[in-house]
Amino acid sequence: MQYLFTTLFILGFIAFLVFVVLMILSIRKGNRLPIRYIFLTMASFAIASIGLYGMLTLSSNSSQSEIDQIPSSQIELSGFHMTTEEFKHKFNGAVGKYRLNGLSITRLNVKNSSEQGTGAFEYVFNDKLRLVGAVNADESLQEIRLYGTGDTSEPTGGIFLTAIATLILTTNSEYTYNDAQNVIQDIGLLDRDVNQSDFDGATVRNGLKYRFNIQDHDHSTFEITVTK
């Protein structure tokens, strides 16, 4: 079929050019424009258009078929795709853009593990909020966890909830603050009937899993991991 549509396009296009030239020459000579030239020009243009449309359609279907045949194991997940330095800049960028007072990262010190070739960092915002991250051997982020200390029987809010929204914005550069709120809503944190003493909610967005859970009556954890 590809050969047929290609042939139609080439022949139709050539015929179209020939008849256009004949029409121009006829007009220059002052002769009356033959009606058959007009019909033949339109017909050749239609044939060329059919050929072109068929070529594009077959090409599109072929490309989609190749994509469908790729094993799911070969499709790369979006993941974090950022180093700790890039993470810090994106986090602080979200803080500044949305004026999220009380949050900012000055420096992330990564402690490497010589045995496993991985590393980790910890950043303390205040005595009730700290950030911990795991780093791969190539210095890219593997996992992020936010630990909150306080009475878990009370609804989650304040700087802890703001930090959660900031991390969501940091890991999704296309998101707005409303998108971050939607993720928090999907996790279930904004539901009125949430049982704060026994809560474990999660949602997946763009290859990342966002999870919030209550560890005990004083400790809560929000984590972001790459889905497998």
Image (tube, grey):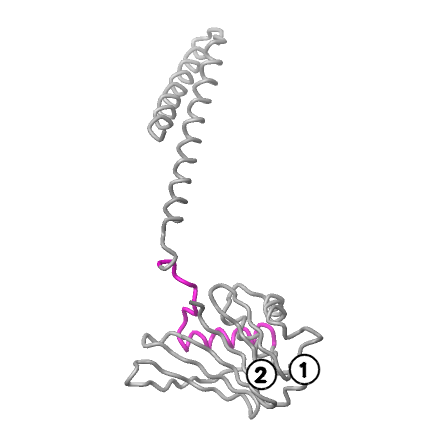
Instruction: Say which element carries label 1.
Output: loop
| 82 magenta-colored | yes
List x then y, in percent, for residue 173.
51, 66
Give the residue at x 28% y 85%.
115
Q: Which mark is drawn over residue 155?
A: 1
List x then y, in percent, for residue 9.
38, 26
The residue stretch that appears in magenta: 74-99
Q: Earlier in the sequence, mark 1 or mark 2?
A: 1
Distance, label 1 to label 2, CA atoms, is: 12 Å
93 is higher (above) or lower (below) than 146: above
Q: Amino acid at mark 1?
A: Pro
The extreme front residue here reads 198
In the figure, is residue 178 to the left or right of 210? right
For the residue pair 66 and 178, the one nearer the viewer reads as: 66
In the picture, which quadrant includes the C terminus? Answer: bottom left
Give the residue at x 49% y 6%.
32
In the figure, is residue 7 to the left or right of 166? left
| 156 magenta-colored | no
Give the residue at x 38% y 61%.
76
Instruction: Say which element carries label 2.
Output: strand
55 is higher (above) or lower (below) than 108: above
Task: Tell me the residue that label 2 is attached to.
Answer: 214
The extreme bottom residue here reads 127
The extreme right residue here reads 192
Q: Nearer the viewer, mark 1 or mark 2?
A: 2
In the figure, is residue 40 to the left or right of 214? left
In the picture, which quadrant includes the N terminus? Answer: top left
